[in-house]
């Protein structure tokens, strides 16, 4: 088991839901990313997703696009991010997933990138634009490195393809609860329970639900239907608001703790 699998096994034994947090790496800088990661670990975050800055983040809404831009402007590159993860690992064993576009992996070379990620202390990859149908070599290399290859399922995914996706994934299934790109919403999807049940019929993997979760009430409601929830844009928005403040980590950490506390009350 790697850290992701271990964490979900621990949560299952304890009868608890998972709380997954997404932030843009290098926003506002990599030193802050390390400090935020350590603060999130103490605040009860189960898994940390780090968005690797990319010039064309097509799956992301405006909030996360701007975070990617700030990450690029701060000089964040995949090698520098891996160095930061090595630094995080000196003080924390929080499971870490890289949320990444395939072009960044392809440029380095798939085998080389996966080995470097594993050596740095990464636990899984979520490659936004690599479909399972084209992932045979990728999955084999990930398995060899002991990393989880995490796949996305959307509300529009046809049943037959959804079955294929979830049977090939590892670590957990990330269910996108809304159509479109990432971003905050005023309410959660009304068909969430039925969609999660449909996925559960084909896999024993945990199902984490994301996209559009903006506050503790929504986080609790979403986690109640799945095995946990993923919150990204709402936290990235807090980083944007407090990025230049000396209280960045305290301010964002307090917001994250309020979300995590809500999830853990289920």
Image (spheres, rainbow, N blue to C red):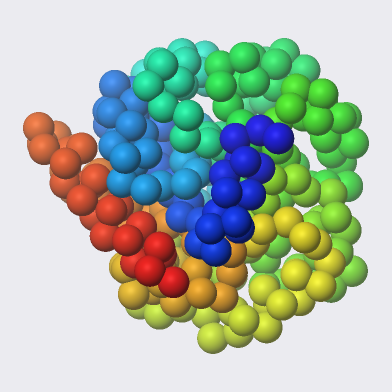
Query: Which of the 4 quarters of the picture holds residue 144?
Result: top right
How many numbered marks appear?
Answer: 0
The quadrant the C terminus occupies is bottom left
**Percent x, y of residue 199:** 75, 69
Identify the residue shown where x is 47% and y is 29%: 93
Counting from the top left corner in percent of width and height, residue 172 is at 67, 51
- Position of residue 34 in the picture relative to residue 97 (left or right): left
Can the viewer see residue 113 in this picture? Answer: no
In this view of the protein, which residue sits in the foreground, 14 or 119? Answer: 14
Q: From what the image shows, is residue 106 above or below residue 18?
A: above
| Nearer the observer, 9 or 28 | 9
- Residue found at the far front of this picture: 13
Residue 111 at what x, y percent from top left?
Answer: 77, 17
Is residue 82 shown left or right of residue 116?
left
Residue 20 spot, x, y in % from top left: 48, 51
Nearest the eye: 73 or 165: 165
Q: Nearer the viewer, residue 223 or 74?
A: 223
Residue 98 shows in this picture: yes
Q: Residue at position x 63%, y 49% from top?
A: 9
**Which quadrant would residue 212 be assigned to in this image?**
bottom left
């Amino acid at each position: 088991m790697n850290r992701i699998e271990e964490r979900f096994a621990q949560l299952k034994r304890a009868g608890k839901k998972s709380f997954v947090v997404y932030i843009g790496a290098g926003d506002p800088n990599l030193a802050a990313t390390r400090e935020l990661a350590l603060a999130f670990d103490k605040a009860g975050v189960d898994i940390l997703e780090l968005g690797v800055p990319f010039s064309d983040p097509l799956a992301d809404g405006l909030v996360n696009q701007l975070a990617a831009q700030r990450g690029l402007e701060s000089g964040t590159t995949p090698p520098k991010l891996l160095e930061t993860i090595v630094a995080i690992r000196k003080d924390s064993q929080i499971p870490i997933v890289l949320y990444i576009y395939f072009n960044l992996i392809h440029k380095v070379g798939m085998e080389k990138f996966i080995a470097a990620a594993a050596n740095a202390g990464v636990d899984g990859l979520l490659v936004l634009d690599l479909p399972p149908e084209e992932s045979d070599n990728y999955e084999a290399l990930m398995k060899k490195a002991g990393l989880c290859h995490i796949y996305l399922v959307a509300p529009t995914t046809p049943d037959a393809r959804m079955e294929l996706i979830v049977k090939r994934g590892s670590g957990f299934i990330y269910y996108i609860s809304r159509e479109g790109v990432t971003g905050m919403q005023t309410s959660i999807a009304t068909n969430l329970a039925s969609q999660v049940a449909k996925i559960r019929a084909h896999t024993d993997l945990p199902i984490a639900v994301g996209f559009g979760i903006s506050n503790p009430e929504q986080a609790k409601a979403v986690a109640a239907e799945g095995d946990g929830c993923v919150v990204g844009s709402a936290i990235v928005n807090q980083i944007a608001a407090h990025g230049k403040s000396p209280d960045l980590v305290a301010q964002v950490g307090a917001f994250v703790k309020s979300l995590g506390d809500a999830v853990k009350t289920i």
